[in-house]
Amino acid sequence: MGDPKKPKKKWEGPAHPWRKDVLLQELELVGKYGLRNKRELWIAKTFLRRIRANARGMLALPPEERRAREAALVRRLYKLGLLTSPEATIDDILSLTVEDILKRRLQTVVYEKGLAKSIYHARQLIVHGHIAIKGRRVRSPGHLVSRDEEENIEVYAGSPYRKMIVEVGQR
């Protein structure tokens, strides 16, 4: 069960941490998506690794059990916004990349919706409590935004930043 003060680790680091091509790719992704450090990238990579391992494990199952589990996984990934179609297949799941997951982070979605001037500004707004989903503050830039939550992302009602937006909009 484990000690409640020591939660289960959400990430696994790279097997070969000093390969130049991996370092350059990680550095590019950290800059592009405004990540605080590589650990946030490794969390996304581990999440993807577990999804893909789950999908590969389904390939060995009997056909009727495979269909049921595949449908459940596809439904879950579609709700998360990682798949574009609810009729996706295991091949679509196996073709997911870490960038697909990084695009679903709250920080990236806030920037793409135009609520922030830059990806770094989006992170700052989230951490300081200016962003809400369905009226509830979310202070984690790494929160994976589902399809249902995506249209409900807004500036928090009690935020002074919202008042600035309203004043600018009235002019």
Image: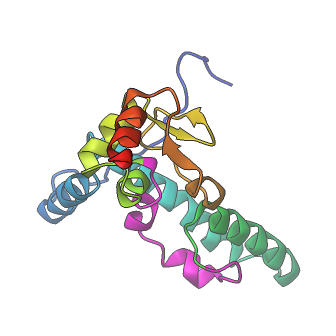
Magenta-drawn stretch contains 125: no
- Residue at 62% x, 61% y is 147
* Left or right position of 13 against 2: left
- Residue at 20% x, 63% y is 25
**Front one among 33 and 157:** 157
* Left or right position of 166 against 85: left
Figure colour scheme: rainbow
Q: Quadrant of residue 1?
A: top right
- Residue at 50% x, 34% y is 156
Residue lying farthest to the front in this orientation: 171
Residue lying farthest to the left in this orientation: 20
Which x, y percent locates residue 159?
44, 28
* Left or right position of 122 against 92: left
Give the total number of marks visible in the rendering.
Answer: 0
**Front one among 151 and 67:** 151
**Front one among 126 and 99:** 126
Eyeballing the image, is 29 above or below 97? above
Which x, y percent locates residue 134?
63, 42
Which x, y percent locates residue 126?
40, 36
- Residue at 65% x, 82% y is 88
Which x, y percent locates residue 89?
65, 83
Please give the range of residues in magenta. 85-106
